[in-house]
Image (cartoon, rainbow, N blue to C red):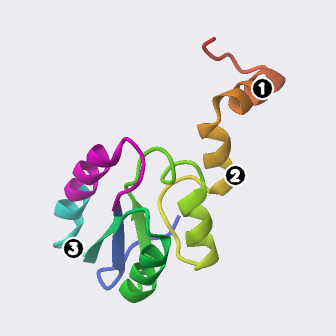
Amino acid sequence: MVNLKKSDKISILRGGISDEKKISILTANQVYDVLKNKYKTTLIDVELNCEKLLQDLINSKPDKIFNCLHGYFGEDGQVQSILNYLKIPYTHSGVLASSIAMNKIVSKKIYKSLGVKYPK
């Protein structure tokens, strides 16, 4: 576990391209309100434009990303892949775990193979 320092710069991802965009914005705004007085904190609005996202990530030069994206592109490993490529640490599961967790069919096959009970 990495400890945060007062000097750390944290960028918060909000919005996204899924149907859960509105809840992502609410979540990110709450996180921002909590972190802004303790850390150098910026908000990054995520839209369909991947070039803009990459430029925003590079320009903000964060030490860490707080991922408040929900659903498709936020919780399925895609944005995590981009952050891994840029070598920016982030909150959330990694690429593989996120991808598997969002695919309920694959998740259930893994649970079954491990003997883990799950809802039908």
Using the image as rendered, state which of residue 58 and residue 7 is in the foreground.
Answer: 58
Residue 42 location in percent, x, y?
Answer: 27, 75
Magenta span of residues: 14-30
Element assignment for label 1 = helix
Disc 2/disc 1 C-alpha distance (Å) = 15 Å
Other residues around mark 2 within 10 Å, as few (<14) / some (14–19) / many (≥20): few
Above or below for 47 versus 107: below
Identify the mark nearer the N-term, 3 or 2. Answer: 3
Within the image, what quadrant is residue 107 found in?
A: top right
The percent position of residue 66, horizontal first and vertical second, equals: 39, 63
Is residue 26 inside the magenta stretch? yes
N-terminal-most mark, 1 or 3: 3
Q: Residue furthest top?
A: 120
Q: Which residue is mark 2?
A: 96
What's the residue at 39%, 73% (across, down)?
Answer: 4
- CB under 8 Å between discs 1 and 3: no
Q: What is the crowding at mark 3: few (fewer than 14 residues within 10 Å), some, or many (at least 20)?
A: few
Q: Residue furthest right?
A: 113
Please identify the quarter of the rendering in which residue 30 is found: bottom left
| Of the two numbered discs 3 and 2 in the rendering, the one whose residue sits closer to the viewer | 2
Instruction: Give percent across and percent down for residue 116.
Output: 72, 21
User: Which residue is drawn at the image coordinates 39% and 88% (left, top)?
Assistant: 59
Name the disc covering residue 15, or none: none
User: Which three-letter amino acid code belongs to the residue tagged 3?
Assistant: Lys
Q: Residue flagged by tag 2: what amino acid is it?
A: Leu
User: Is residue 46 within the magenta segment?
Assistant: no
Q: Which residue is mark 1?
A: 109
Residue closer to the observer: 85 or 50: 50
Residues at discs 2 and 1 in contact (Cβ within 8 Å): no
**Measured along the vertical axis of the image, is residue 77 above or below residue 119?**
below
Residue 38's tag is 3
Q: Which SS class for mark 2?
A: helix
